[in-house]
Amino acid sequence: MTLLCYIPGCRFLHVTREESTTLRISAQAKRDHARCPGCRTVSRSVHSRYHRRPADLPTSGQEVRLTLTIRRFYCHDPACARRTFAERLPGLLDRYAQRTCRLVDAQVRTALALGATPAARLLPHLAMPTSATTLLRGIRQCPLPTGSKPIIVGVDDWALRKGRTYGTILVDLERRHAVDLLPDRSASTLAARLRRDPQIQVVARDRSTEYARGTAMGAPDAVQVADRWHLLLNTRQMVERWLARVHPRLKLLPAVAPSSPSIRRVTPYPRAPSEMLARAAARGRWEAAYDDVRRRHAEGHSLRRINRETGLARATVRKYAFAASFPRNGMREPKPSMLDPYLWHLHGRLNEGCENAEQLWRELQGIGFAGTSKQVHRWLSERRAGLAGTTIRSSPAPTDTRVAISTASPLASSKQLSWYLLREPEDLGPEAAAVVSRVLQDTEAAKVVDLGRRFCRIVRSHCGQQPSGKSDVPAFDQWLGEAQTCGVRIVESFAASLGQDRDAVRSALTLPWSSGQAEGQITRLKLLKRAMYGRANLDLLKRRFLLAA
């Protein structure tokens, strides 16, 4: 029993069972003396005794209640203000506590992992019942970890309330754990935090000017490293912004047939009239928003003010403000359908002249199709050479669209095109390569794509993938000089921003550090925040995040 219910500094007297699930263990201190907490004088003169009944860790799935016999001793030091004092059990119980220290620790650790309310529901089944309020109080009383001082840190922002309130996270990149959460993402707040750790030598960050300024203010001797993933992201965004402006012009370029045509859908299936009306209404609302942004921008309003007054996203405001006409989306790839694996059979039978949807559906069922005949009817409705037998109204015969072998895709959207254009030619499929070849017929497009691909190659071939002693800094400097004088305003603006952050970009090409570990910690932070339904304030969220690590 002593091994099962070890009580530090005490000896057992007896054990009784109060209820079917509760054990009562009586014990008292082993020592025959105690030390006065005021003057530290040792006393062996017992004044009186009383009992304390705290809860303890469970044993064999049963709740444990202790009955501790506590002695009061006389203090014989005439200079001490105390006349009597109670003996202490520092490894077991705090003053006035109703729970042992080890029980409190187990309950708080459970709350850190699950949250206060879920832990309060689970702990009764583990024979450690308590309330959610008590668990919250325990979390707030836990001291924050004070580990070794970080030398290489990653800095990134995270959303306490997306689109409204943002904070900053600091991560120790060497030890891979979070260091601190800051209440905002301003330069002054970051600088004040960095001054508390003057030993920091490297700061990995995204391309935020606030973080660059805050690092320069708080750790002027630290090396700033721009995150390579963000450099690639900014490059794709630059190409996407350029495409949004010239997309109408690129649509007029002649199509280039892919090297190996394939049978696939290039348009979605027909939509119901209600869906078409809803889509037209949504398009009208976006066109009205575009007109409003253009009017405000012409009146001299800043993009930030337009974003604040209209409620549109900053990227949308920027796109609308600089677009000469309403930026309509390009043709998007249709979503997957149950019919896609059976298109080869449908096209073959259609070329043979079969235009009976029910017959085609029965044939598809024979080879494993699990859908309904309605899907086959919708597919066939826009590919008939003549009217169906059940058609009661006359209409002109549609053009022959029975052959669905794609020889040229409609021009993709600006976002999809930006992905195609920055990939290496050998990584593109036949259809994507045909789209890229079509766009590269434009002289300005060829220049933008060449600069974008070259910069992506420079960033991807960082020092961790280079032979020893080789650096991409000279290649970056050469690229920067060409981009700043290329004649394309968006590319020149992007190159100018890289020039302002030149030292951080050079460090990214020579050092292995990045803010990728910070992104992983933010993912864990989001999990905690959403587990608390977004209602935790910064103090509680910070404690759970740092203590649970």
Image (spheres, rainbow, N blue to C red):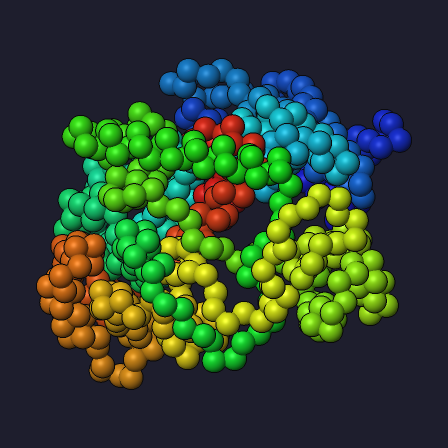
Q: Nearer the viewer, residue 257 or 61?
A: 257
Q: Residue at x 57, y 39 (%)?
A: 276
In the image, residue 481 above or below residue 240: below
Q: Is residue 137 visible?
A: yes
In the image, residue 336 above or below residue 544: below
Q: Residue furthest right?
A: 20
Q: Nearer the viewer, residue 146 or 253?
A: 253
Q: Position of residue 546 (x, y in %)?
A: 45, 43
Q: Position of residue 128 (x, y in %)?
A: 71, 34
Q: Position of residue 369 (x, y in %)?
A: 79, 63
Q: Position of residue 307 (x, y in %)?
A: 30, 32
Q: Nearer the viewer, residue 501 or 24?
A: 501
Q: Is residue 157 left or right of residue 280?
A: left
Task: Name which quarter of the figure residue 164 lies in.
Answer: top left
In the image, residue 247 above or below residue 402: above
In the image, residue 408 above or below residue 270: below
Q: Residue at x 65, y 25 (%)?
A: 131
Q: Is residue 537 left or right of residue 247?
A: right
**Numbered disc total:** 0
Q: Is the N terminus in the top left, top right, bottom left or bottom right quadrant?
A: top right
Q: Nearer the viewer, residue 448 or 442?
A: 442
Q: Residue at x 34, y 42 (%)?
A: 326
Task: Name which quarter of the figure residue 290 lies in.
Answer: top left
Q: Residue at x 30, y 40 (%)?
A: 320
Q: Is residue 151 visible?
A: no
Q: Is residue 320 left or right of residue 434?
A: left
Q: Is residue 167 left or right of residue 108?
A: left
